[in-house]
Image (cartoon, grey):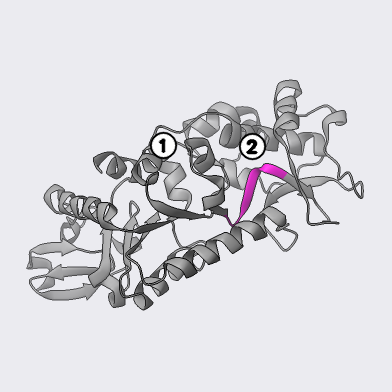
Amino acid sequence: MFLKKKITAFTGGCLDTDNKTVNVKAAEVNSDDTRFKICNEKYENSKVKKLEELLNKSDTIVIGAGAGLSTSAGFTYSGKRFEDNFSDFIEKYGFKDMYSGGFYPFESLEEHWAYWSRYIYINRYMDVDNGTYKRLFELVKNKDYFVLTTNVDHQFQKAGFDKHRLFYTQGDYGLFQCSEPCSDVTYDNEDIVRDMVEQQKDMGIPSKLIPYCPVCGKPMSMNLRADDTFVQDEGWYSASERYTDFLRRHKGLKVLFLELGAGMNTPTIIKFSFWRMVNEWKNATYACINLGEAYAPREIQANSICINEDIGNVLKQL
């Protein structure tokens, strides 16, 4: 019976049990199930060691970063951090987490921006990183690297990454855009966000601080990809072109596609594209570090390392 077999390895996406392979999804793994005592220390450590060797040998590293990386770095959107900063909104509206609260249709722009200014400030301008991003930078700073990320918290640049080697596909907490939008222009928001945070009172900002588009006069909104009003500005297109050119120039070389914390919310941006390139490029390798979601399809498992651990903890070991 399968339950009685000794599990000797878990590569993510499959369980290897006495030379038999059974496909599973990471989401189906139950830590209380004796079949899935898979991340034994010895086995996980061997994969970390293999990843360290790959980092040293690879000519090129393409990093694909999702929300799990920022979560590991300390950017949690629920629990104590949320409760400490949004207790008044929690009491009034019953919000369970920061993210879902951002979609609430507040009755006034004053209240809307009171919520969002705090949201932006603690995730974009407050120093939170526990060292995870800085450790990642130390590992790749002397490599030929490029970063593709769906994160919008600007942590790569704050950690020292070259902004010309970054492509933020989903926007930036530090940018406003016209809510219409009337043009493909974005606006830095640091000064006004800090003013909103400092001057807000009773869950509202002063009306004079409400941001309006300087072109058409409509209210501003966040430059975040939530619907078809998202503005892809000149900087967005320039970054996209640099990423495409980087891939073109490095095709055929020893490329390590390092996926960190990318889940299945927008899998076509990072996960699926990385899988496709590793399958097509004979010298490419796929590595994934993601607690609870580290797996690879059968077609590329021979060229994959999947580590089911906290990203920050793994980076410290490299």
**In what element is the residue under mark 1?**
helix
Q: Which residue is mark 2?
A: 120
Residue under the image location 59 percent in, 57 percent down: 169
Disc marking residue 134: 1
Query: For this rendering, which residue is in front, 313 or 156?
Result: 156
The span from disc 1 to disc 2 (Cα, nearest Å) is 21 Å
Query: Considering depth in this image, is 30 or 286 the residue closer to the camera?
Result: 286
Q: Is residue 127 above or below residue 50?
A: above
Left or right side of 303 for 156: right
Most prominent secondary structure in the magenta stretch?
strand
Q: What x and y, as percent, mark residue 218? A: 88, 48
User: What residue type is disc 2 on?
Assistant: Ile
Q: Is residue 143 visible?
A: yes
* The quarter of the displayed image where residue 182 is located: bottom right
Q: State which quadrant residue 83 falls in.
A: top right
Mark seen at residue 97: none
Where residue 8 appears, as percent x and y from the top left, is: 10, 62
Which callout, 1 or 2, points at the residue further toward the start of the chain?
2
Stretch in magenta: 168-175
> In the visual, does 256 lie left or right of 94?
left
**Amino acid type of the residue tagged 1 in the rendering:** Lys
Indicate the position of residue 304 as horizontal and vertical percent values. Answer: 27, 65
Question: Closer to us: mark 1 or mark 2?
Answer: 1
Q: Residue at x 64, y 37 (%)?
A: 120
